[in-house]
Image (cartoon, rainbow, N blue to C red):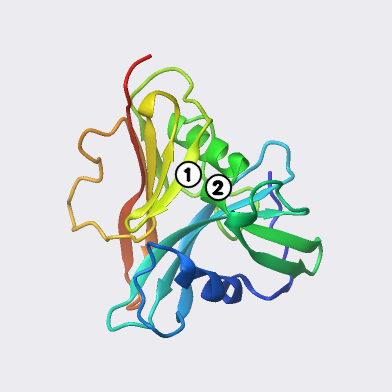
């Protein structure tokens, strides 16, 4: 179980993301710097207790219409070998010291726990409270047996796609779209998905799809 420390991060997570976000191909902002606010998210626990895993939702108010982004992040006490392309930045943690923050879509620990969430083997945890499940995060899977956690990750204009053996794909929606009231959140043709909620700038809550799993070709 991860412990939430009440301490100071320098720079803050939002400060790191303000610099990093415009470099992503799925970023929809204009020419100015993002104006980010935390809007929600959840955590997953690393079974070994070494890596912090957070799926953060932020809203960017720099354009004419606020845009919500899903930002999976991992926090490590040392650099992740071979993941220089996925480094968001480094922070000084008031309790844990220097932390390396990575795009969690490219971190094998984060991906393994996301797959475990979809399979129903782990539960999403509250973003701000230790040892408290987040009941707004709902995961579903229609196939039996363990999914592979071998993957390659590719970013495109629509989000990030994780390709697994035999063509199975796990797509993370980086730009979030609120679902209409009463609409189904089960993506057509999917074998698994994760849904969650976040806060809109007006103060109301929105709900939408975070990740979708599609089957590939049988072995």
Q: Which type of secondary structure does the marked residue at label 1 adopt?
A: strand
Q: Is residue 196 above or below residue 168?
A: below
Neighbourhood count class around disc 1 (C-alpha, 10 Å): few under 14, some 14–19, many 20 upward: some
User: Is the Cβ of the residue at disc 2 closer than 8 Å to that at disc 1?
Assistant: yes
The answer to whether any part of residue 136 appears in the image is no
Q: Is residue 111 above or below residue 182?
A: above
Q: Nearer the viewer, residue 82 or 21?
A: 82
* Gap in angstroms between the C-alphas marked 2 and 1: 6 Å
Residue with the mark numbered 2: 106
Q: Nearer the viewer, residue 71 or 157?
A: 157
Give how far across and how far down residue 91 sits, in percent.
72, 68
- Residue 209 placement, left or right of 53: left
Q: Residue at x 68, y 36 (%)?
A: 47
- Residue 51 placement, left or right of 110: right
Residue 65 placement: quadrant = bottom left
Q: Nearer the viewer, residue 98 or 20?
A: 20
- Residue 111 placement, left or right of 27: right
Q: Which type of secondary structure does the marked residue at label 2 adopt?
A: helix
- Residue 96 placement, left or right of 121: right
Q: Is residue 62 above or below residue 127?
A: below
Residue with the mark numbered 1: 153
């Amino acid at each position: 179980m991860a412990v939430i420390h009440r301490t100071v991060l320098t720079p803050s997570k939002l400060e790191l993301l303000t610099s990093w976000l415009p470099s992503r191909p799925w970023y929809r902002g204009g020419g100015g710097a993002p104006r980010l606010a935390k809007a929600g998210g959840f955590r997953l626990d690393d079974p070994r207790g070494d890596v912090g895993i957070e799926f953060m939702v932020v809203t960017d108010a720099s354009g004419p219409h606020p845009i919500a982004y899903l930002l999976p992040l991992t926090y490590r006490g040392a650099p992740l070998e071979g993941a220089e392309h996925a480094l968001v930045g480094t922070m000084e943690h008031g309790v844990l010291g220097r932390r390396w923050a990575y795009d969690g879509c490219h971190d094998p620990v984060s991906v393994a726990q996301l797959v475990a969430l979809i399979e129903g083997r782990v539960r999403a945890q509250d973003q701000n409270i230790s040892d408290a499940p987040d009941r707004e995060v709902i995961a579903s899977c229609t196939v039996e047996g363990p999914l592979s956690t071998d993957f390659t990750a590719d970013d495109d204009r629509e989000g990030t796609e994780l390709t697994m053996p035999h063509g199975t794909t796990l797509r993370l929606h980086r730009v979030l779209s609120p679902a209409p009231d009463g609409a189904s959140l089960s993506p057509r043709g999917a074998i698994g998905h994760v849904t969650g909620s976040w806060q809109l700038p007006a103060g109301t809550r929105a709900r939408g799809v975070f990740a979708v799993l599609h089957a590939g070709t049988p072995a």
